[in-house]
Image: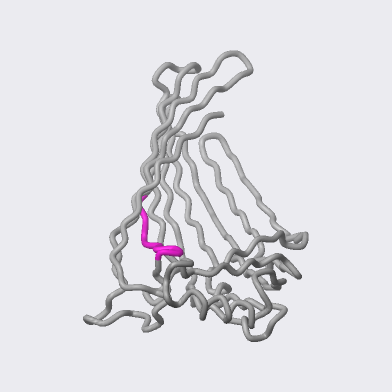
Amino acid sequence: TNIEGRSEINVTPSFGVMYRHEKLSLGLMYHHKKTMKFKDQDATLANAISSGDPGYSWSSALLAGLGGSDHKISSELNLPYLFSMGIAYQFAPVFGAEFNYVRAGWSTFQSLDLDFDNDALDQELHFNYTDTWQLRFGLDFAVVQEKLNLMLGFVYDQTPQPLASVSPLLPDSDRNDYSIGLEFKSGNWKFTGAYMAVIGEERTNIENGQPANPDPAYPVGTYKSVANIFGAG
């Protein structure tokens, strides 16, 4: 099944506040949870059995009985609130440090209802996510004062995904993120380049010798992910 669509416009309140005094900075940010609504979007059902296989004609008849390949679908996707607070301190003209705590209300993402124009196709995907938190640390060194800064960062990111929801669709896990960057200053300009390695901890959806989710749509497997992220500004 290939589902493609665009949500209705969503307006969500957020606010932030920052206090600065000499070498100290304190900040708070809140972004409210939101529901993205999809109505009468396009869904295409494809025959997963190749034409040479014995089950092809049966599968084609089933597809025809469901109304063919082209359908309309509606759904709602719940996204979490985000709350973060941070503190930064400039210990010396050439050295500063920062710490952030981030809370994400992922418990709002419990399931995803797929409402097709043909009721026989309707299904509910269960995710049962939980609220999570992140810890973020950053260091800033002046290699050449007023000209070149070296930046180092680390993030511990807790997964909201329960073991029963782990699948090839999204094999999420707790992550450790390591970052390094350089900032060059010239007059009124700042040029920044950065790299981050996002390393997901290995995770298997086998629990006590049994699949954590008996649904065959969640195949048993062991997953490990790595992402390489580059940025420039």
Q: Can residue 91 be seen in this view?
A: no
131 or 39, which lies in front? 39
Q: Residue furthest bottom?
A: 120
Instruction: Report the magenta residues as a range.
Output: 168-176
Across the whole image, how many numbered discs are drawn on residues?
Answer: 0
42 or 61, which lies in front? 61
Identify the main secondary structure in magenta.
Answer: loop
The question of residue 207 being in magenta is answered with: no
Q: Is residue 121 above or below residue 86?
A: below
Q: In this view, does 176 lie to the left or right of 116?
A: left
Quarter assignment of residue 153: top left
Q: Residue at x 64, y 83 (%)?
A: 65
Q: Residue furthest left?
A: 209
Q: Residue at x 30, y 80 (%)?
A: 211
Q: Can residue 62 be seen in this view?
A: yes
**Colour approach in the figure:** one colour
Q: Residue furthest top?
A: 187
Q: In this view, does 72 lie to the left or right of 30?
A: right
112 or 78, which lies in front? 112
Q: Where is residue 37 in the image (x, y as percent from the top left)?
A: 72, 68
Quarter assignment of residue 96: top left
Q: Is residue 219 above or below residue 142?
A: below
Q: Where is residue 135 in the image (x, y as percent from the top left)?
A: 42, 54
Q: Residue at x 45, y 42 (%)?
A: 98
Which quarter shows the N terminus?
A: bottom right
Q: Is residue 32 left or right of residue 137?
A: right
Q: Where is residue 120 in the image (x, y as percent from the top left)?
A: 63, 86
149 or 2, which lies in front? 2
The question of residue 175 being in magenta is answered with: yes
Q: Position of residue 24 (x, y in %)?
A: 52, 40
Q: In this view, does 124 lie to the left or right of 166?
A: right
